[in-house]
Image (cartoon, rainbow, N blue to C red):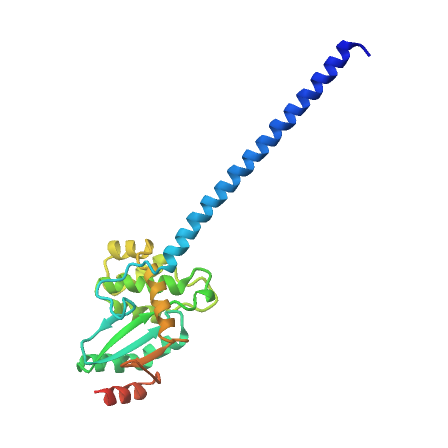
Amino acid sequence: MSRRVEQKRAAKVVREQIARERRRRRTLWTSVVVVVALLLAGLVGYGLYQAQRTGEYTAPPGAVANDSGIPVGDGPVTVDLYVDFLCPACRQFEQQVGPTLDQLVADGRITVVYHPVAILDRLTSTAYSTRASAASGCAAADGKFTEYAAALFEQQPAEGGAGLTDDQLVEIGTGVGLAADSFGSCVRDGTYRSWSGHVTDEAGRAGVAGTPTVMVDGETVGSSADAITAAVDAAG
């Protein structure tokens, strides 16, 4: 074998080694870039998760009970009412017991604090409980919580479907006298969605396991008109 051939072969080996080293470095840097990108994405995701877990939320004006409830009335006895707008039993409660609560409020005997929780999101494909709760916060901000809540129960969608759309939630609001522009923007922007989560978390801390749940001055009572009236009488 001639010296020239050996030199060419040696040069080829060197070139191949250099090429392999370059490929190794490219692979290494690509891996580093991917790891950094994943780390940054993880940090962003963790930051968002932490923001949610730390309870950052926007509550409607006038919210009470650690911002978890909407007060109606100014009576000396507090009636806390936990409802989910997708809950059929809550709809029945509104129809059967709602007038009694309204009368007790009108008589100046109670303050009803409504807690619109969202525990039934899993029963719709659009997180309807959360969206309806948030929309009720928009109604509360404009002073029409009870009217809007009653209308939501009247037009309650079936469990297992998509629930009402945001446009339908807005339409219900305009039907009770809410302004289409401001109320509509509040609903569609999800202004009070974080608050809905806060209300639900606070309900869990209060020991609420289902809806409707009624408490009179902090004590859980039956959800019938007679049981609530008797508890109010005893507390008053």
Looking at the rendered image, the quarter that the C terminus falls into is bottom left
Position of residue 179 in the picture relative to residue 86 (left or right):
left
Near-viewer residue (54 or 122): 54
Give the tally of numbered discs.
Answer: 0
Front in this rendered view, residue 155 or 87: 87
Q: Report the quarter where the N terminus lies.
A: top right
Q: Decide which of 44, 217 is in the foreground and name it.
A: 44
Would residue 128 be found to the left or right of residue 77 on screen? right
On the image, which quarter does residue 190 sit in?
bottom left
Residue at the far front: name it. Answer: 3
- The image shows residue 81 at horizontal and vertical percentages of 31, 76
Q: Residue 150 is drawn in which quadrant?
A: bottom left
Q: Position of residue 106 (x, y in %)?
A: 18, 79
- Identify the image quadrant of residue 21: top right
Q: Is residue 63 above or below residue 110?
A: above
Tell me which residue sits at (24%, 61%) in the image.
178
Residue 123 sits above or below residue 41 on the image: below
Q: Nearer the viewer, residue 55 or 213?
A: 55
- Picture coordinates of residue 222 (x, y %)? 35, 85
- Residue at 26%, 74% in the rendered image: 113
Residue 87 lies left or right of residue 227; in this view the side is right
The structure residue drawn at horizontal position 39% and vertical position 62%, both measured from the top left corner, is 164
